[in-house]
Image (cartoon, rainbow, N blue to C red):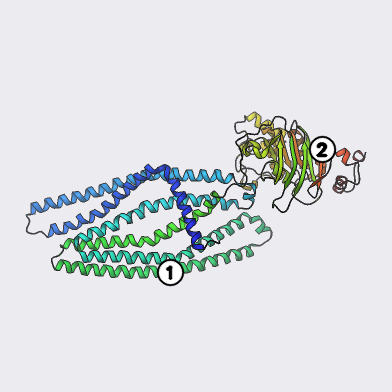
């Protein structure tokens, strides 16, 4: 049965509240200390007007001797001073634990989100914008702080102050008490009604804000495309349309808010006039002393201020709770790829077996159908696709970015689905087609897998990867920063750094995914020399687009329609003119093969 929107909202809010309560549990002592401080503050703030207004009665007691009158005044002033000092001390009782509590709790939230999000699959990150994911984490942590602050400093204050105020007024005069109670009920009801009216616009506004932020971020990130296509006017129009839609919703919100202020103001003003009337009438008939008139007016102002915050509290709480739902949905989404055991992978030789593998990104659309491939320890294997795309799919399966639908993949006779993902990936090296570098120093990027590597080891790896020379020309050498999106490095420089990283890793299995496909011929020659160094004494899988880079491989696998159709060395494959490899090699060499290859 389809869940209604209202029921879905309740379920979502329960999820958020449950998570926030769980995050607060480890800090219950600090929370209790802050709650105690908040209660003391509210009571001191509540009691202080009683003694402040008593000053009026004492001053009006003309029949009391001046010395006695002064003594009573001093006594009351000391009580007021004591209440103020208690208030000051109680605020420290609230703030010091709150500082520690909120810092520790938000740190815990950031750490949990960081770790849990990184455990999601490769597909998850291809389906989501990185900037959006970062904002969702920040929203969750910020929302948690907002909810805690509102509860401790506002909601708790209202819960204590308003009932106690009504009790104090009730002891003074029954009619004024009933009037206070009626005002609280009417004012609170109005705030809740107006909040429910604006709630749907609040949700829509949050959605439009997210959309506007996303479009702004997407456009700025793609500034290069906007510039080369001279599409600023188009992007501006698109962004303006989003802002216009957002403005319409916010206009409706603001209109309702203004009506809320108008009606709430009338209710408050009416109550204030009637409270003055009833107070003066009660004083005229000797039912209350003159100080109670002032006390009632002080409480009227304070209650009105407290109740005027109800709508803001509901609005802020609602926004905070809704903003946190996006990240909580991610935290409540099970990881697509999961560890089934705690067993660690142990690689001794580097043998790889794809045993009758069935795989499809969508279950009913197979890519591999009974793929069977065995790679010996230390063997250098190149994989070539005759046509189409998806040449990296095989490597993604080896790294277990996706789970296969049938049978298994073995590394040194161990099923990779029955070992932990970390232990698998920890022992595999990858040089991707488009190396992704961190916005950190070159040293940190090369030594990413071995952060404790010595200077000599890092430089030796860089020399083997043919990148030491260009690094030496940089101002800060190996401490030079790789800037955001690597705009300060060329493609071949990034490739060399990635190869240096793989050399320093020195793992038994190495995967190179079209490492030279985007380079010019000269750069390709340098990279090829570096690749020869990094592949020594390793089991290697090379995904190749340019066939000239794989002639030295022990085995070349040609695939067509996602099946292995040819599997021999370059010398064997090139001899048969009817084979796909021969045709591909001929096309890439301009239909001219060297005499050595033709033999």
Q: Position of residue 376 (x, y in %)?
A: 77, 33
Residue 477 point in image, percent of width and height: 63, 36
Residue under numbered circle 2: 555
Residue 257: percent from left, percent from top: 42, 67
Residue 481 falls in image quadrant: top right
Q: Which residue occupies 32% across, 49% down?
A: 38
Would you name the residue on which mark 1 appears? 256
State the quadrant of the C terminus.
top right
The numbered mark, 2 or 1, whose residue comes first in the sequence reads: 1
Residue 348 higher or lower than 388, as above or below: above
Question: Quick one: 525 or 118, which is closer to the camera?
Answer: 118
Q: Nearer the viewer, residue 223 or 379?
A: 379
Give the distance between the C-alpha atoms of the residues marked 2 and 1, in whole angstroms: 73 Å
Question: Above or below — where is 255 with respect to 419?
Answer: below
Residue 424 appears at what percent x and percent y? 65, 37
**Residue that appears at 17% across and 61% down:** 291
């Amino acid at each position: 049965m389809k869940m209604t929107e209202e029921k879905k909202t309740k379920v979502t809010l329960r999820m958020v509240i449950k998570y926030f309560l769980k995050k607060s549990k480890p800090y219950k002592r600090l929370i209790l200390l802050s709650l105690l401080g908040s209660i003391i503050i509210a009571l001191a703030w509540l009691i202080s007007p009683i003694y402040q207004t008593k000053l009026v009665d004492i001053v009006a007691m003309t029949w009391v001797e001046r010395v006695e009158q002064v003594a009573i005044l001093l006594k009351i002033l000391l009580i007021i001073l004591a209440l103020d000092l208690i208030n000051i001390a109680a605020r420290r009782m609230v703030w010091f634990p709150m500082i520690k509590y909120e810092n520790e709790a938000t740190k815990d939230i950031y750490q949990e989100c960081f770790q849990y999000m990184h455990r999601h699959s490769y597909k998850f990150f291809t389906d989501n914008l990185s900037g959006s994911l970062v904002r969702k984490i920040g929203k969750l942590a910020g929302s948690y702080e907002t909810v805690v602050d509102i509860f401790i400093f506002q909601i708790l204050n209202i819960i204590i102050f308003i009932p106690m105020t009504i009790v104090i007024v009730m002891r003074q005069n029954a009619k004024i008490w009933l009037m206070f109670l009626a005002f609280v009920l009417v004012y609170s009801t109005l705030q809740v009604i107006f909040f429910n009216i604006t709630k749907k616009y609040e949700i829509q506004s949050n959605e439009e804000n997210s959309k506007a932020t996303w479009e702004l971020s997407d456009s700025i990130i793609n500034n290069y495309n906007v510039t080369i296509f001279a599409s600023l006017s188009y992007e501006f129009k698109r962004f303006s349309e989003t802002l216009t839609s957002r403005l319409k919703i916010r206009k409706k919100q603001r209109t309702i808010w203004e009506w809320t202020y108008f009606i709430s103001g009338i209710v408050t003003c009416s109550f204030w006039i009637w409270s003055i009337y009833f107070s003066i009438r009660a004083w005229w008939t000797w039912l209350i002393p003159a100080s109670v008139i002032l006390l009632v007016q002080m409480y009227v102002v304070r209650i009105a201020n407290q109740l005027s915050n109800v709508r803001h509290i509901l609005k802020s709480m609602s926004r905070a709770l809704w903003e946190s739902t996006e990240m909580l949905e991610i935290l409540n989404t099970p990881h697509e790829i999961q560890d089934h055991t705690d067993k660690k992978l142990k690689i001794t030789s580097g043998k790889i077996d794809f045993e009758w593998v069935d795989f499809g990104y969508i279950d009913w659309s197979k890519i591999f159908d009974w793929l069977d491939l065995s790679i010996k320890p230390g063997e250098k294997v190149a994989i070539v696709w005759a046509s189409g795309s998806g040449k990296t799919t095989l490597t993604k399966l080896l790294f277990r970015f996706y789970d296969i639908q049938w049978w298994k993949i073995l590394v040194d006779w161990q099923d990779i689905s029955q070992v932990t993902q970390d232990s698998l990936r920890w022992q595999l090296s990858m040089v991707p087609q488009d190396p992704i570098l961190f916005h950190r120093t070159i040293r940190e990027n090369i030594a990413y897998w071995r952060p404790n590597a010595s200077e000599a080891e890092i430089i030796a790896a860089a020399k083997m990867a043919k990148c030491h020379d260009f690094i030496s020309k940089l101002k800060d050498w190996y401490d030079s920063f790789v800037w955001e999106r690597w705009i300060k490095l060329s493609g071949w420089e990034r490739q060399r750094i990635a190869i240096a990283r793989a050399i320093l890793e020195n793992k038994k299995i190495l995967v190179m995914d079209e490492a030279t496909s985007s380079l010019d011929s000269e750069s390709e020659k340098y990279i090829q020399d570096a690749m020869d160094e990094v592949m020594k004494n390793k089991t290697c899988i090379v995904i190749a687009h340019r066939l000239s880079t794989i002639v030295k491989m022990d085995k070349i696998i040609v695939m067509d329609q996602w099946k292995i159709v040819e599997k021999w060395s370059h010398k064997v494959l090139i001899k048969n003119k009817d084979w796909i490899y021969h045709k591909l090699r001929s096309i890439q060499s301009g239909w001219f093969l060297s005499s050595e290859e033709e033999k």
